[in-house]
Image (cartoon, rainbow, N blue to C red):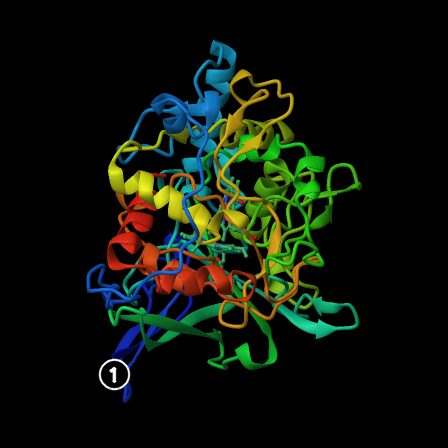
Amino acid sequence: MSTITTGPDTAPSAAAGPVVSRRRARRATRVWLLAAGTLAAGSIVAACGGGAPATVAPTSTTAVRSVEEIERQGGAATVFNEGAGAFEQPVPGMDSQQRRTFAVGNSLFNQNWVTAPASTTGRDGLGPIFNAQSCSSCHFRDGRGRPPESADDPERGLLVRISVAGDDGAEPHPVYGDQFQDRALRDQTAEGSVVITTTERPGRFADGTAYSLAVPDYALITADGTDISGSLMVSPRVAPQVIGVGLIEAIPEEDVIAAEDPDDADGDGVSGRAHMVTDPRTGETVLGRFGWKAAVPTVEAQNAAAFVGDLGITSSLHPDQPCTAVQTECLAAPSGGEPEIEDDELAQVTFYTRTLAVPARRDVRADDVVAGEKLFSEIGCAACHTPTQRSGPSDIEALHEQTFSPFTDLLLHDMGPDLADGRPDGDASGREWRTPPLWGIGLVERVNDHTRYLHDGRARSLSEAVLWHGGEASTAQGRFTRLLAAERRALLVFLESL
Ligand code: HEC
Ligand code: HEC
């Protein structure tokens, strides 16, 4: 129960640290900031308690697969590494040239970009306004970000997209654009800071076990101290782990589209539709695959958008800095090159991210993992989190025509009002989200030292992540709350084995 206030952050060269003051808040509410920000450990759902009978369909027969086939959830792109480096591994089977490109891409992903002009011209061009200095400051160890936990928290894993209502639904804000950059170079003004306030919402499983969900609220405080969130559509998002994106990219578009059921013709309450978007390289309309709303079609497009939006690094795909027409000081800042990242470097980062391997599953023969996997299908989770996909042809051997288990259909689903951000993104509505892949989810804690899930990291455990499901997932969520304690635990242990 504290209110934490910081001013917007500046680049490290600007030396001045954030101004921090604290005072007591009146209600059972925690406030913290993005530029530094958090959540003390809240009540995690207890995984025990007696039980009301669960409504679970009879066990279906699962195809017999060998232990190794089950473990290899990334097909030939699987690595057997369950340590803190589990998300950083190259896919097996690359030649020496490919491994060199991976290594160069890795360093571009991890290096801190600096203010232009600098003697190290290969890595200048940061900002003028930005959210982080490197890709890895949000995707630490190629993993997942989380909301900040206190005013002193240097965590950079969350960013905030914004829009205002316009003729076409949502338009960039005339002053702040479509992303709230909370940091700036010396002599520049950061757009402001993000204040997150959470309120606990208690609930109970059918067996009486109590849980509590932390309902977040986001205020955007500009440099002059005004909260502009009321006049905006605000979409906070944490950085997901980057593993397996090459496989996701190689799934034939028609396979994803074939699974659409926009009008719920089969009447199971789950519809799902493909998010068709424009490929910035070709101008063609193609399937969106990446990001929390599947608004981005390719790994290259995602990376180029991250360079300009998150770091302020221009590329041939995004030649303009993230400044709006009225941000004159931002527009006048020195450039680190035209563009700031060359095409060959962008290609190296793209190769690197595309060839990040998927860690193998663990404990796949344990009784509760096997029981949990059955429950996952039976209570309807697999209707969206499609266990198996197949890739088409790829010039990277480990990605070529593989059968793998991302646990996603890559489709958009209406997840109900509680998860809605109210901000349309491309053709995705303010209530729709892409089913996220679940592979690697059981290793997030080991890699990133936290257990925060969902698009804005609001869930503090896997159980909370499931409890937040609504909309098309209401039936599955309801069944989850009616499981016996032992079944609930089995389902969660299964998720931890991914
Ligand atoms: C400020 C934090 C932040 C930084 C810095 C950042 N990212 Fe991200 N990254 C995100 C967020 C948030 C998403 C989800 C975006 C969305 O929903 O539109 C994401 C998504 C991605 C994805 C898609 C993953 C998926 O499963 O859909 C890739 C690939 C990626 N980022 C690569 C990069 C690269 C390369 C860089 C450096 C140029 C980078 N990111 C820098 C926050 C960040
Ligand atoms: C109607 C489709 C749908 C169904 C059914 C569904 N999910 Fe999800 N799931 C999603 C979407 C979409 C998200 C992302 C929502 C968000 O971030 O706001 C998600 C998120 C998750 C996450 C967090 C993932 C992450 O990367 O943070 C977990 C864990 C999860 N689901 C497990 C389950 C389980 C277990 C079930 C069955 C009880 C289930 N889901 C049923 C669509 C679905």
Taking depth in this image into account, of 436 and 283 the one nearest to the observer is: 436
Q: How many marks?
A: 1
The kind of residue tagged 1 is Arg
Expressed as whole percent of the image width and height from the top left, the position of residue 316 reads 69, 38
Position of 423 compared to 50: left or right?
right
Expressed as whole percent of the image width and height from the top left, the position of residue 428 reads 66, 59
Expressed as whole percent of the image width and height from the top left, the position of residue 17 reads 32, 63
Confirm whether residue 90 shows in the render: no
103 above or below 473? above
User: Circle 1 is placed at which residue position?
Assistant: 23
Name the quadrant of the N terminus: bottom left
Q: How would you rate the neighbour count of disc 1 (Cα within 10 Å): few for under 14, some for 14-19, many for 20 or more?
A: few
Mark 1 CB in 8 Å range of ligand 1? no
Extreme-front residue of the structure: 58
Expressed as whole percent of the image width and height from the top left, the position of residue 345 reads 57, 29
Confirm whether residue 49 shows in the render: yes
- The residue sitting at 31% across, 57% down in the picture is 461
